[in-house]
Amino acid sequence: MNTLRFCLFCFVLVFDIKGVAMAVAAMNSKNDRSMFSSSVASSVTESGGVGGCNFTIPRSTTKLLKVETTAEVGGDGGGAARVNAWVDSMRASSPPRVRSTITSPFTLSQTGDEQNSWNLSHPSAINMFEEITNASKGKQIVMFLDYDGTLSPIVEDPDKAFMSNEMREAVRAVAKYFPTAIVSGRSRHKVYSFVKLAELYYAGSHGMDIKGPSKRNKYKNAINQAVMYQPASAFVPMIDEVCKILVKKTKSISGAKVENNKFCLSVHFRCVEEKSWDALAKQVSLVLDEYPKLKLTQGRKVLEIKPDIKWDKGKALEFLLKSLGYANNSSEVLPVYIGDDRTDEDAFKVLRDRGQGQGIGILVSKVPKETKASYSLQEPAEVRDFLQLLVKWKSLKLQSQRMEA
């Protein structure tokens, strides 16, 4: 049998030191067969809503680990190895139904000592509420909230991830006192249909679709209330095309669901039996082979397919702070970000890099996880309690100021 010897450039699934799945994609450098290979510019330049600032996002800049290999391949070859790596990662990132020997780089094994150690280094944001509010002295708090797993519970059907009325009222109350943004992997329109609060900022598609409040607010530093920014707009036709292909390719896999988030795609496997994960990963791999300008990352029982551009929830956070007039003056603002997933780590990193006391990252998790967040909350119910505490604290503070005046 003849074997084909060729050079394959492979982007391998990697985890950073905090265990964040950074990206997966693959391409044959000799044969870029995507119909979009020449129609999408080598860089995307957009004018943001902040004083006409231009944002240039080079397509060549990537957070992937590029490995050049020369291999003799007969048949599937490297593709099979890539699929196996994906499936291993899918298992590692998914809480097992029974005890497993697999340990995820993102989720630590849950021994008592490790749990206690993690709790000490990532204390409850409720228990440390006074410490958090002390850090806000002389600063404007700006709230950033993930949706799934943070404001709503994780559910089997992503279309039924509804937030409670009590949670909605807590978010509404927070937005009366602090600029508040929802930063989600969902499409902006989808997450708005869940939250239904016009006074918020919304950053959908992992921050690639940003829009300011439709209801006027009183935030004095806001530069442009009607801010709107879509750094991946050139990819919409490609995303639509890949969505149709994936729906067709995965329809035989029971429980698989492909969600079009306009600027990115989510392939949900929460309801897929583990024995079918290999088949699902293989179908996704085959499709992405044809679209090297897209990359794949993982969340909680979901494969995320995104444009390969330098943009994430951390970039969205920075953009929104700049829109509010705070980006270059960290002494006047305290951004607080609450999220539960790997994609939120980009935002946690931005806050940590601002310096101690200049940003608060809060991870929502019942189990120890490697994270750049400083504090933790166990579940959406605790997120609601924290938001209610914040509102009560601010209300009492304003009352006290009025009495002293």
Image (cartoon, rainbow, N blue to C red):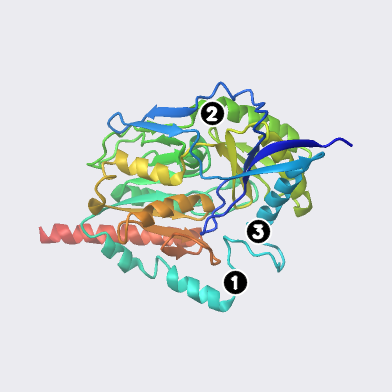
Q: Which residue is mark 2?
A: 235
Mark 1 and mark 3: Cα distance apart in space: 14 Å
- Residue plotted at (69% across, 62% down): 96
Residue 256 appears in the figure: no
Give the structural element (helix, strand or loop) at label 1. Answer: loop
**Which residue type does callout 2 highlight?**
Phe
> In this view of the protein, which residue sits in the foreground, 1 or 254?
1
Mark 1 vs mark 3, foreground winner is 3
Mark 3 and mark 2: Cα distance apart in space: 30 Å
Q: Check whether the beta carbons of the residues at disc 1 and disc 3 lie within 8 A of each other.
A: no
Which sits earlier in the primary sequence, circle 1 or circle 3?
A: 3
> In this view of the protein, which residue sits in the foreground, 115 or 55?
55
The answer to whether 199 appears left or right of 20 in the picture is left
Which sits earlier in the primary sequence, circle 1 or circle 2?
A: 1
Q: Check whether the beta carbons of the residues at disc 3 and disc 2 lie within 8 A of each other.
A: no
The quarter of the image holding the C terminus is: bottom left
Q: Which residue is mark 1?
A: 110
- Residue plotted at (73% across, 48% down): 81
**Which residue type does callout 1 highlight?**
Gln
The label number, if any, that marks residue 92 in the structure image: 3
Which sits earlier in the primary sequence, circle 3 or circle 2?
A: 3
Give how far across and how far down residue 73 sits, in percent: 78, 40
